[in-house]
Image (tube, rainbow, N blue to C red):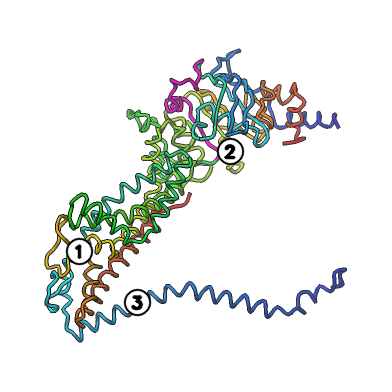
Amino acid sequence: MASNTTNDTESLISTEVSVDRTHDQPASPETVVEATDIDVYYGDEQALDGIDIEIPERQVTAIIGPSGCGKSTFLRCVNRMNDQIDACRVSGELDFHDKNVYDDDVDPVALRRKIGMVFQKPNPFPKSIRDNVAYGLNVQGKTEGVDERVERALRGAALWDEVGDQLDSSGLDLSGGQQQRLCIARAIAPDPEVLLMDEPTSALDPVAASKVEDLIDELVEEYTVIIVTHNMQQAARISDKTAVFLTGGELVEFDDTATIFEDPADERVEDYITGKFG
Amino acid sequence: MSADTERGNVREWMSDVDLRWVKRKNRLFHIALVGASLFGVVMLALLIADVILDTLIGVVVFEIDIGTFLTRAGSSDWANAGFLGAMIGSAWLLVFTLFFSFFLGVGTAVYLEEYAPDTRTTRLIEANLTNLAGVPSVVYGLLALGVFVNAMRLGPILIAGALALALLVTPIVIVASQEALRAVPDGMRNGSLATGATQWQTVRGVVLPSAMPGIVTGTILALARAIGETAPLLMVGTVWGMRHYPGPFDRFGAMPTQIYEWAFLPEIELQYLAAMGIAVLMTILLAMYGVAFFVRNRYERSY
C-alpha cells in the first residue's frame, strides 16, 4: 500500500507538474507578507491556529488543503477583509513590508489599495466594462490617464482582445471566464503589489480556468500572487511555493512546490496530496 | 422475460390500480387553489365594472359634465362641483409625502442593512419597523393631529397631512428598501471593499445603484397606498366643501376625502359625483401600479 502511494505521487508529479518552474527570481526574494502566530476565531470556533508563513515577492504562493481548513480565512486576513465579519477575531502579527497590518494606525481601506483580491465567484458590478475596470481608480481618486490604465489592465488580464471594442457594454453580459478576467483587471488596474486569489477558477469551465492559469503565470512578473485552491494539480502547475493547511486551521507544511509534491516532510501532507483524504 | 418479480407482477402495479379517488382529490385541490387566487381578481373586476357603470349613469342620467368635473374646484351646487381642487390637494400630498418618506426611509434601510451591527438593539428596531408597517392608518392620523397640528402649531394644513401620510408609509418604504438591499449579492460589496473603496463608496457606487429599481418600485407602491388613504387626513382635519385649489400651507382636502364627503351627503346626484371621483382615483392608482410594474420588469435583474 505504501509503495502504491509513492507510485501515485510520482505519476502525479511526472504527468501534471513540470516541477522546476521558475520565474527567473533572484535566489532569495524579499518577503512581502509575513505572518507570525496568527490565530483566527469566529465566535468561539477557532479557524486558524498559530500560522507562521513568509510569502516571497513576485512569486506564486499556493495555499491548499481540504474544505474548512481555513485557507480562505488566511487570505482574508492579509487584506483585513475579515474585518467585515462581526464575530471574527484575529490575533498575532501579520506584516506587510514589515508593518503589522493589525496595528491600530493601519487603515484597512488604505491597505486594500495595495492588496488586490479576486474571488471565487466572478463578481463584476452591474456597470459597463470600462466602469468596472476603472472602479478602483475612481474610489482611490486616481483620475489621470484612466483610459490608458483601463486598457493596460484589460491587456494585463488577457481580456483586451475580446472586449476592447465593447467597453460600454455591461460587465454582466460577459461569459463566466471573461467576467473572472474582468475582475482580475479590476483588481490590477490600481496597480497593487499583492494579488490575493480565492479559488479563482473553481466556478469556471476547464478552458476558461486554463486561461486564468496562464494569466497568473504572467501576472507574477509584476505582482506577488497568493492563491487559494483546492485543486492540487493547479497548485503544482502554477505555484512556486505551496502551503498545506489541514483541518483545524493548522499550517502543516510550507515549502517549494516541488518539495511539497515530490518529497513532503509531513506524512499527513503526503496522504493529502496522494488523495488519501480531503 | 417475465413480468413476475419477487415483489409481484409488474404489470399489475401499473395498470390494475384504482387511483381515481386520489386523482379526484388532486383535481379538487387544484380547482380550489385557482378559485382562491381568482377571488381577488374577480372582486377587482366587479369593482371596476361598478365604478364605470355609476360613472356612465352620472354622465347620461344626471348629465354631469366630465370636462367641468375635471377642471373645477368643489362647489355647494352639485352641477358646478368639480374634482380638480381635490386632485391638486392629492398631488401636493404625494410630492411632500415622497419628500418626507423617501430619504428617511432609504437612509434608515441603508443604515440597518449596511452599517448596523447585528445586535439585539438592531433586531428590536427591525421587528418594530415591521410592526409599524401594519399599524392602522387612523392611528398615524391621531399622532399627526397631536404632534404636528397641535403641539407644533402647524394647524390643519396640507403639510401636516403629508407628514401624517409620511409617518404611515415610511415603515413600508424602509421594509421594501431593506428587501431590495438584501437582494444585492455580498460578492459585490466584497468586490468593492477589496478594491479599496470605503463603506460609503461601496454603498453609493455599487449597492444603491443595484438596489434602486427595487427601492423605487417599493416606494411607488407605498405612495399608491398613501394617495388612497382617507382616515389620517380626516384626523388632521380636512376642509368640507372645499372651493379652492389648496397649496402646501393652506387648509386642504384630497381625492379620498372629497369622495368621502360626497358619499356621506344625502343627495343622490352627489353619489354619482363620488363614483366619478373613485373612477379618477382608481385610474391614477392603476397607473402608479403600472409604473411600478414597469420599473420592476425593466430594470431589476438577478445576479
Kind of residue at badge 2: Thr
Q: Dividing the image into 4 quarters, which one contains the N terminus of chain B?
A: bottom right
Q: Chain of mark 3?
A: B
Q: Chain of mark 1?
A: B
Picture layout, residue A169 above or below residue B168: above
Q: CA distance from mark 1 to mark 2?
A: 65 Å
Q: N-terminal of the two: label 1 or label 3?
A: 3
| Secondary structure beneath label 3 | helix
Kind of residue at badge 1: Thr
Q: Is residue A101 magenta?
A: yes
- List the residue tagged with mark 3: B47
Kind of residue at badge 3: Leu
- List the residue tagged with mark 1: B238
**Pointer 3 local density, CA inside 10 Å: few below 14, some 14–19, many at least 20:** few
Q: Nearer the viewer, residue A156 or B49?
A: B49
**Disc ID at residue A201:** 2
Residue located at (23% from left, 73% from top): B277
Q: CA distance from mark 3 to mark 2?
A: 57 Å
- Residues under numbered marks 1 and 3 in contact, where contact means CB atoms less than 8 Å apart: no
Picture layout, residue A156 above or below residue B86: above
Q: Is B230 placed left or right of A221 in the picture? A: left
Q: Position of residue A214 (x, y in %)?
A: 57, 32
Closer to the eye: label 1 or 3 = 1
Q: Which residues are magenta?
A: A98-120
- Is any atom of residue A50 visible in this view? yes
Q: Quadrant of residue A163?
A: top left
Residue located at (20% from left, 79% from top): B270
Closer to the eye: label 3 or 2 = 3
Q: Nearer the viewer, residue A130 or A44?
A: A44
